Amino acid sequence: MNGPALAAVIFDVDGTLVDSERHGHRVAFNQAFADFDLPYRWGEDLYGQLLHTTGGQRRIDDYLAAQGVGPADRARLAPALHAHKTAVLEQLVDAGVIEVRPGARRLLRELAAEGVAVAVGTTGSRRWVERLLRRMLPEVSWAAIVAGDDVTARKPDPEVFTRCLLELGRPGPAGVVVIEDSAEGLAAARAAGLCCAVVVNGYTAGHDLAGADLVLDGFGEPGAPAAVVTDPHGAGAGGILTVDLLRTLSSGIVRR
Ligand SMILES: [Mg+2]
């Protein structure tokens, strides 16, 4: 059934579409520290905490400040480290180290088949995101891609999503659903007035997601359903995030 209720779906990238944090970004940050002869190494648990700071360069800057690095050194180091880390990450992408989350490809295929526009709203850099999407999801035609370089304020600020709506030609949040993996992304979607389904991963399962319209622990696939964490509107969620389920969420049980 094709209805007008679902016009577009906006996806976060890191942690949502791709399992990029633990085995991608974190590894690349550590390689950058090593290549700059700096003693810092981010373990998996520490990185989970650092992820609350969105934007890689800001994450480095905040961390260096906490290590007692002064403003002048940080102003020099943070951009240089971040640029190097991005180059390392691109090599990881090309090496096929980063994977699309199970079920994401299926959902994107179903959305395309039903004529629902898909967009990306991320705090990652455009260069990284475009390279990643081109390599990992070349079959998807994105109606809009808004990256961290396109906004003045990153998530949890809603700017990335309000810009997505503009680029999608949507007059407002009605008929659009955001899919996120984290509390910061959820907060940004909510601040933009958008319906938001969250697919948590190992790093974000403990986040406070009280405002989410649906929380699953993955996209789910036939034969390998995700766990339903919360279905606050009684949308009848099974363990598979489907177009029909997104349509239900956007069609009126959720805020106006
Ligand atoms: Mg994310």
Image (cartoon, helix red, strand yellow):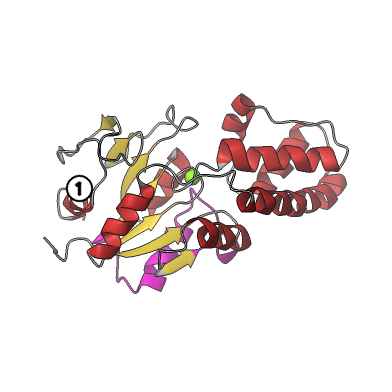
Residue 193 appears in which quarter of the rendering?
A: bottom left
Dot 1 beta carbon under 8 Å from ligand 1: no
Name the residue located 31 percent from the left edge and 70 percent from the top edge.
170
Per the image, label 1 sits on a secondary structure element best described as helix
Query: Which is nearer the eye, 227 or 38?
Result: 227
Residue furthest to the bottom: 169
218 falls in the magenta region: no
Name the residue located 24 percent from the left edge and 61 percent from the top edge.
174
Left/right of residue 16 with respect to residue 25 in the rendered view = left
Q: Does 30 sit above or below residue 104?
A: above
Left/right of residue 151 with respect to residue 167 in the rendered view = right
Left/right of residue 92 with respect to residue 117 in the rendered view = right
Q: Which residue is mark 1?
A: 245
Q: Does 254 sit above or below residue 119?
A: above
Query: Which is nearer the eye, 120 or 240?
Result: 240
Q: Position of residue 199 (x, y in %)?
A: 37, 40
Name the residue located 16 percent from the left edge and 50 percent from the top edge.
248
Q: Position of residue 42 (x, y in %)?
A: 69, 31
**Residue 194 visible within the image:** no
Query: Which is nearer the eye, 28 or 11?
Result: 28
Type of amino acid at the residue the image marks with label 1: Leu
- Which segment is the magenta one? 146-175
**Residue 202 visible within the image:** yes
159 falls in the magenta region: yes
